[in-house]
Amino acid sequence: MHTLILLLMTAALLLPAYGMPGPVRGKHPMVMRNPMPGGPAVRPLFEIFLAHRKELDLSQEQVGALKNIRSLHNKEAAQYNARIIILRNELGGRYEAGRLNYKAIGKKVAEIDAVQSKLRSSYFDAMDKADNILTEEQRGKIKKLLSSGMPGGAVQPEPETKPEPETALPTSESEPAPAADEHQMHE
């Protein structure tokens, strides 16, 4: 019984620390449902913009700025994620003690939650910077692309299509239909 209570208390404390996502509300085309627990619920805008650079007609300056935002965000996110791993390991050490100190466990969970909050804030700061790189016309194009996306939020650039060559062959519209009498005569 003691073990069950301990497991339930641990789960209750760790759920906020592991950043379980809530429901994604609204139908904004850049927000998608979370495919895996604890993972990101929103694909980074800079990745979407860079994947569709041709469709958006991004300038070299815009591409460079988006790559810079991506690089800085990835570096910052790596630092936060490393800190979270260290804190989770420290939290695990608290459970290995002979007698559990629930106040210390709670403080460690709050510390993990604070770092995760900074990570989320950093993410949205990067998204704001990326969004400000595009012109209004480009924002309209990306919204149109994303609203016609694939299920689950995956969006792929549309393949380049070549126009069909015109042929001189007659089509069924230009050929007269055979008369009913002719059809019966050939049978």
Image (spheres, grey):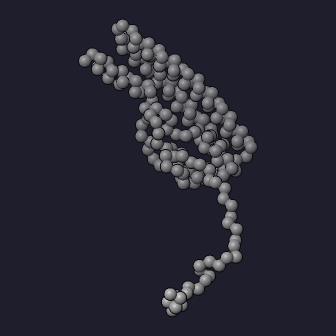
Q: Position of residue 53 (x, y in %)?
A: 67, 47
The residue positioned farthest toward the right in the image shown: 60
The residue positioned farthest toward the top in the image shown: 98
Q: Is residue 107 above or below residue 134?
A: above
The residue at the point 40 percent across, 16 percent down is 105
**Quarter residue 3 falls in:** top left
Tally the marks: 0
Q: Position of residue 138 (x, y in %)?
A: 64, 50
Residue 160 visible in the picture: yes
The residue at the point 46 percent across, 42 percent down is 33
The residue at the point 62 percent across, 82 percent down is 174
Q: Is residue 87 above or below residue 164?
A: above
The residue positioned farthest toward the left in the image shown: 1
Question: In what quadrant of the picture does the N terminus appear?
Answer: top left
Q: Is residue 66 above or below residue 183?
A: above
Q: Is residue 164 above or below residue 67?
A: below
**Which one is in front, 172 or 112?**
172
The residue at the point 58 percent across, 34 percent down is 125
**Quarter residue 99 falls in:** top left
Q: Position of residue 44 (x, y in %)?
A: 57, 39
Q: Position of residue 6 (x, y in %)?
A: 32, 18
56 relative to 25 in the view: left or right: right
Residue 180 visible in the picture: no
